[in-house]
Image: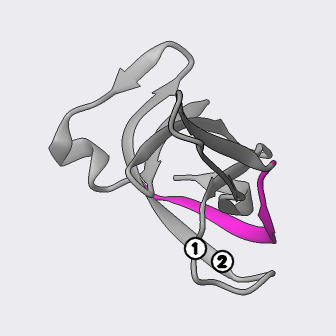
């Protein structure tokens, strides 16, 4: 059984037991969170109707908070002696999917 959930403006295909990185959530490690389900499939039967999907929930547990790999942004203007280097590390929350019901 899998489900498509949405959080942080993105969609993720998950199954029970998956550990995924999502956009940063303001929860502590060990907290339980609920995600909105957009679609689910169980043994080939797909449920995507809005009235049926509203009854479904996906619960998960926050495993860790962290930062992703550094992305280097380098801006350069030719013949102008303009150079600008900037780094960024996107924060994320690691969650483990507990159940889809």
Q: CA distance from mark 2 to mark 1?
A: 11 Å
Left or right: residue 56 compared with residue 25: left
What's the residue at 59%, 63% (across, down)? 59
10 Å neighbourhood of mark 1: few (<14), some, or many (≥20)? some
Q: What percent of the width, then of the height, locates residue 81?
A: 59, 42
* Residue placed most toward the observer, 55 or 73: 73
Residues marked 2 and 1 touching at CB (< 8 Å): no
Give the residue furthest to the top.
44
Q: Position of residue 32 (x, y in %)?
A: 65, 77
Colour convention of the picture: one colour
Residue for point 72% across, 58% down: 89
| Residue at horizontal 70 percent and vertical 51 percent from the top | 21
Is residue 24 covered in magenta?
Answer: no
Q: Quadrant of the N terminus?
A: top right
What label does residue 25 carry, if any? 1
Quadrant for residue 88, please give it: bottom right
Q: How many marks?
A: 2
In the rendered image, residue 95, in percent from the top left (x then y), is placed at 73, 60
Magenta stretch, residue numbers: 57-69
Q: Nearer the viewer, mark 2 or mark 1?
A: 1
The overriding secondary structure of the stretch rendered in magenta is: strand
Q: Is residue 47 left or right of residue 73?
A: left
Pick whichever of labels 2 and 1 is earlier in the sequence. 1
Judge left or right: residue 91 versus residue 50. Answer: right
Badge 2 density bin: few <14, some 14–19, many ≥20, Cα 10 Å: some
- Residue drawn 77% across the image and 43% down it: 18
Q: Which dot marks residue 80?
A: none
Task: Tell me where residue 26 appears, x and y as whole percent.
Answer: 58, 83
Q: Which residue is labeled 2 in the image?
A: 32
Q: Is residue 65 magenta-colored? A: yes
Q: Secondary structure at mark 2?
A: strand
Secondary structure at badge 1 equals loop
């Amino acid at each position: 059984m899998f489900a498509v959930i949405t959080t942080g403006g993105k969609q993720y295909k998950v199954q029970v037991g998956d550990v995924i990185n999502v956009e940063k959530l303001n929860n502590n490690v060990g907290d339980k969170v609920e995600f909105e389900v957009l679609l689910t499939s169980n043994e080939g039967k797909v449920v995507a109707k809005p009235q049926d999907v509203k009854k479904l929930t996906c619960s998960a547990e926050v495993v860790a908070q962290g930062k992703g790999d550094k992305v280097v942004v380098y801006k350069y203007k030719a013949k102008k002696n303009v150079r600008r280097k900037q780094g960024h590390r996107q924060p994320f929350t690691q969650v483990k999917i507990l159940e889809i019901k």
